[in-house]
Image (spheres, rainbow, N blue to C red):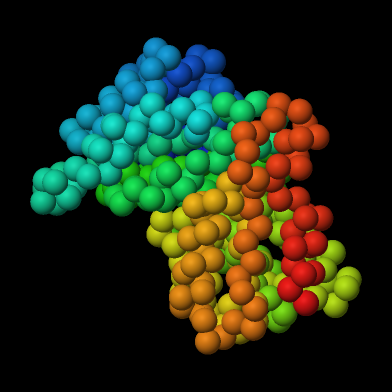
Amino acid sequence: MELTYRDALRQALDDSMAQDSTVVVIGEEVGRYGGAYGVTKGLFEKYGAERVIDTPISEAAIVGAAVGAAMTGLRPVAELMYVDFIGMTMDQLGNQAAKIRYMFGGQIGVPLVLRTQGCTGRSAGAQHSQSLESWVMHTPGLRLAMPATAEDAYHLLRHSLTMPDPVVFIEHKALYTRKEEVDLSRPCAPWGKAVARRMGDDLTIVTYSRMVHYALEAATQLALEGIEATVIDLRTINPLDMETVAAHVQRTGRAAVVSEACLTAGVAAELAARISEECFDYLQDPVMRIAGEDIPISVSPLLESHSVPSPASIAAAVRRMF
């Protein structure tokens, strides 16, 4: 069936709640209002106030309550309106949820999913447009999923709600209205497994979330010039499927990594380092990092669009490798 990214997420929540009575949704305006981006619309009417729980405007309270609920047998889906607010939850998320299984010797876990949205595309300004996935990636004990397609949005969220450990699920705000064909009955690639969205022999572009679509556009441009690129969609950042990445980099001999997050100390830096370490003998050139500027995001649509990679800038960076 054809679904938007938003509708695929809603369907995943609905199907999971119907199948498992321990799944509950908690967050600001997730009930009657249907969520800030409409993902939970209709769930309150279907499942009631005990399973779709509206909260005060307190991110620490939302995640703290979800941690406690997860420890006592529920599978909460906590929604943060923007990933920019994750800093206010880092004690509950980073000091508690991420560490409880280890500190309790495996006797208890925290099977929660923290849904939030991030990145640019809505001219939401510096405090509502950040890409903070490296904060999560840096914290042992947290799983991290960032789907690029509606089908992955559905299947990765369904899978997240079966995991024994906390999953941070970051949705790109500019993808919610993207419509694609989704097969709900056919499982996508296994959890933690990257997929090649395009095959080429000249270089490998490694990326995730909306940048997958930008990389594919760039690869189409480059193909007209005789440069054939493989595009890898990581799908999850923790776990990171370096086996798939390394196999393609070794085959093509060149690698570029693309991230909407800041260049310095970000996901692109980690990927470039890992590729350099694991594929050094196969690389014909240093790994190219293509990432966001190290600046706050402007509310101006023009400045915002120029502060993160675009299909044109990805293609231009890749050309410098040849």
**x 66%, y 26%: residue:** 124
**x 71%, y 42%: residue:** 307
- Number of numbered discs present? 0
Counting from the top left corner in percent of width and height, residue 237 is at 47, 55
Counting from the top left corner in percent of width and height, residue 194 is at 52, 65
Counting from the top left corner in percent of width and height, residue 257 is at 61, 63
Residue in the foreground of this view, choosing between 117 and 132: 132
> Can I make out residue 304 in this image?
yes
Residue in the foreground of this view, choosing between 179 and 79: 79
Looking at the image, residue 17 lies above or below residue 289: above
Left or right of 121? Residue 145 is: left
Looking at the image, residue 255 lies above or below residue 150: below
Looking at the image, residue 29 lies above or below residue 304: above
> Can I make out residue 3 in this image?
no
**x 48%, y 45%: residue:** 133
Looking at the image, residue 309 lies above or below residue 40: below
Residue in the foreground of this view, choosing between 41 and 192: 192
Left or right of 294? Residue 83 is: left
**x 22%, y 29%: residue:** 68
Q: Please identify the residue farthest to the right as the structure is shown.
A: 224
Q: Quadrant of residue 314?
A: bottom right
Q: Please identify the residue farthest to the bottom as the structure is shown.
A: 281
Q: Which quadrant is home to the C terminus? A: bottom right
